[in-house]
Image (spheres, rainbow, N blue to C red):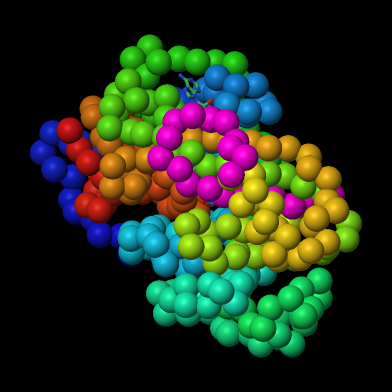
Amino acid sequence: MYQSSKPQRGLLPVASRGQSPVAVIGAGIAGAWQALLFAQAGHDVTLHERSDTAMMLATSHWAGGMLAPWCESEISEPIISRLGLRALDLWRRELPDTPFNGSLVVAHTRDRGDFERFARMTTCHRRLDARGLSELEPSLQGRFRDALFFAGEGHVEPRRVLPKLHERIIAAGGTIKFNSEPAPADITGIVIDCRGLSARDRLPELRGVKGEMILIETCEVELARPVRLVHPRWPLYVIPREGNLFMLGATSIETEDTGVSVRSALELLSAAYAVHPAFAEARIVEFGSALRPAFPDNLPRIAIHDETIAVNGLYRHGFLIAPALAELTLAFVERGQIDNEVMQCA
Ligand SMILES: Cc1cc2nc3c(=O)[nH]c(=O)nc-3n(C[C@H](O)[C@H](O)[C@H](O)COP(=O)(O)OP(=O)(O)OC[C@H]3O[C@@H](n4cnc5c(N)ncnc54)[C@H](O)[C@@H]3O)c2cc1C
């Protein structure tokens, strides 16, 4: 399935040097999937995380958790769809209760042109009329004249799914050390560096792209799936969470400041109000922001240097692509397979 080549000279599959222990640094979505697949494959895995179990220092903690390869193809390179489609299978395999009930795209009348463009740039969607939309999401009755339905997409709740993945790592025989902050150089054996933006000491071209979000609570609106509102600047969305909570996301700003601006808050709250006016009465539970780790081309990279493998640059697609990146790393370590699109060997 993947473009791969035989191991090059000097790039021996690391496992061929013996069954070295595997240390994964960073238990965000990238590191959690790496640790899980390596532990399941029988490696002696230790996952180190500097945060406590609440994972507040991870960008992953603040994410929307949409698994949306078709919607994302509007603005992403084909590699994201390739990895994303493979990752959907891995999510289904590992966490079969992951909701795969699709996602919706709607637009204000004034953004009609952008909505039609979104429809042209993406595939695997069905156009719903107002009636079809209200059959799927009764709360949206009368709100929009049509919608795009991407039936194959899914979503996870990051703050619930990270602990689930961590549990599965332990069940597969791995060890997790929270409040543990080693540098890759401190560890012998295979090191998989998934430190996100903190890996800039080794990957200086990484940058942070700010994403802001708001969590609100109301029992006046019920949604079963993410709803994206076409917006001239950012794809804004409302994602239902357990307990009458909704996440409003997400801005995408080229800054490493981590506050939430008034302008962003207004835009996120207006998006919710446009999806349903009853959101105006919702209670604001949380404002938050985090920095997405990105390389200059906004594409993910697996950088291999001796026994250290850095998995980074997941940008706005961490939840979508992390399982597929873990599968590629494992295939390299066990069989020396190189994926030419994603891997870089020093
Ligand atoms: C608002 C927002 C919404 C988003 N929505 C989506 C979405 O819907 N779908 C999607 O696919 N993606 C989404 N993303 C993108 C996604 O969150 C990122 O791509 C992803 O979180 C990056 O994961 P990571 O594991 O590389 O980094 P992180 O989650 O930051 O994990 C890195 C971990 O390494 C730890 N660490 C750092 N240094 C050390 C050390 N020395 N020792 C031990 N631990 C260390 C950190 O504490 C952290 O836990 C969103 C992002 C934002 C900000």
The residue located at (55%, 23%) in the rendering is 49
The residue located at (28%, 36%) in the rendering is 303
Q: Is residue 342 above or below residue 304?
A: below
Residue that extends furthest to the right in the rendered view of this protein: 219
Q: Where does the image place residue 212, in percent across and percent down from the top left? A: 58, 42
Residue that extends furthest to the left in the rendered view of this protein: 9
Residue that extends furthest to the top in the rendered view of this protein: 186
Depth check: 326 or 9 in front? Answer: 326
Depth check: 251 or 197 in front? Answer: 251
For this view, does 307 lie left or right of residue 247?
Answer: left
For this view, does 41 lie left or right of residue 331?
Answer: right
The residue located at (65%, 59%) in the rendering is 271
For this view, does 33 lie left or right of residue 267?
Answer: left
For this view, does 307 lie left or right of residue 170?
Answer: left
Query: Magenta residues?
Result: 243-263
Report if residue 277 is visible in the image.
yes
Quadrant of the rendered structure where residue 106 is? bottom right
Q: Which quarter shows the N terminus?
A: bottom left
The residue located at (67%, 56%) in the rendering is 270
Q: Where does the image place residue 110, in percent across and percent down from the top left? A: 56, 74
Q: Where does the image place residue 101, in percent across and percent down from the top left? A: 67, 69
Q: Is residue 335 above or below residue 231?
A: above
Q: Where does the image place residue 175, in percent across and percent down from the top left? A: 58, 26
Q: Is residue 219 above or below residue 201?
A: below
Report if residue 332 is visible in the image.
no
Prevalent SS, magenta region? loop
How many numbered discs?
Answer: 0
Q: Which quarter shows the C terminus?
A: top left
Magenta stretch encompasses residue 237: no
